[in-house]
Amino acid sequence: MMADRRLEFICLQPQEVMSTVIAAVLGGLRLEIDMAWMDAITDGDWKPEQRGDVDALLAVEQRLLASGKRRKGTGTGIDLDLSREDEFGLLVRLAPYSIHSEAWVDGDEVFSSSDTGDHALFALTPNEASDGAIRLAEVGYAFEDVLVFRQ
């Protein structure tokens, strides 16, 4: 059986809105995501209120290094286990400000944030997009108002 084709959607919202979009859209995929990572670097300075999250992200990296589980060749990317509530929260809150983050399902990139925090890209099957629309509506956003189909 052939898997559903993924459609690309781009989010061009302010960073604060993008966090909500990431939470809603990736929330439905969270347990299916088999690889996710994020850079602990931003284009400017981290906001003071983000310092605790940045420290927690760096602690994830230290835990991976100490356990020998940090993947080689990841550069500045820090692997995240999105089945863990705390690490999913870090992705949601910091990805819009990080220079880059990604999430993958079965070898398909399903999420990527930009180097400047001005957009995020989602690759979703029709069912995943429908689920994302429901989750976005639950937090007060219409799918078509925050995500644009990218042809």
Image: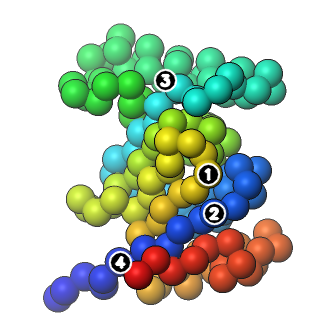
The alpha-carbon separation of the residues under discs 4 and 3 comes to 30 Å
- Kindly state the secondary structure of the residue where label 1 is placed: loop
Looking at the image, is mark 3 or mark 2 earlier in the sequence?
A: 2
Q: Which of marks 1 and 4 is nearer the N terminus?
A: 4
Camera-near label (3 vs 2) is 2
User: Position of 76 compared to 12: left or right?
Assistant: left
Q: Mark 1 points at which residue?
A: 118
Q: Can residue 32 be seen in this view?
A: no
User: 57 above or below 132?
Assistant: above
Marks 4 and 2 close (CB-CB < 8 Å): no
Disc 2, SS: loop
Mark 2 in CB contact with mark 1 (< 8 angstroms): yes
Q: Circle 4 sits in a helix, a strand or a loop, which is it?
A: loop
* Residue reaching furthest to the left: 1
Q: How far apart are marks 4 and 2 (CA)?
A: 19 Å
Q: Residue at x 41, y 29 (%)?
A: 78
Q: Which circle marks residue 12 in the picture?
A: 2
Q: Which of marks 1 and 3 is nearer the N terminus?
A: 3
Classed neighbour count for the residue bearing mark 2: other residues with Cα under 10 Å, few (<14), some (14–19), many (≥20): some
Q: Which one is earlier in the sequence, the residue at label 2 or at label 1?
A: 2
Q: Would you name the residue on which mark 4 appears? A: 6
Above or below: residue 53 compared with residue 100: above
The span from disc 3 to disc 2 (Cα, nearest Å) is 29 Å
- Foreground mark, 1 or 3, reads 1
According to the picture, the residue beneath numbered tag 3 turns out to be 60
Report the label total.
4
**What type is the residue that disc 2 sits on?**
Leu
Q: Which amino acid does label 3 sit on?
A: Val
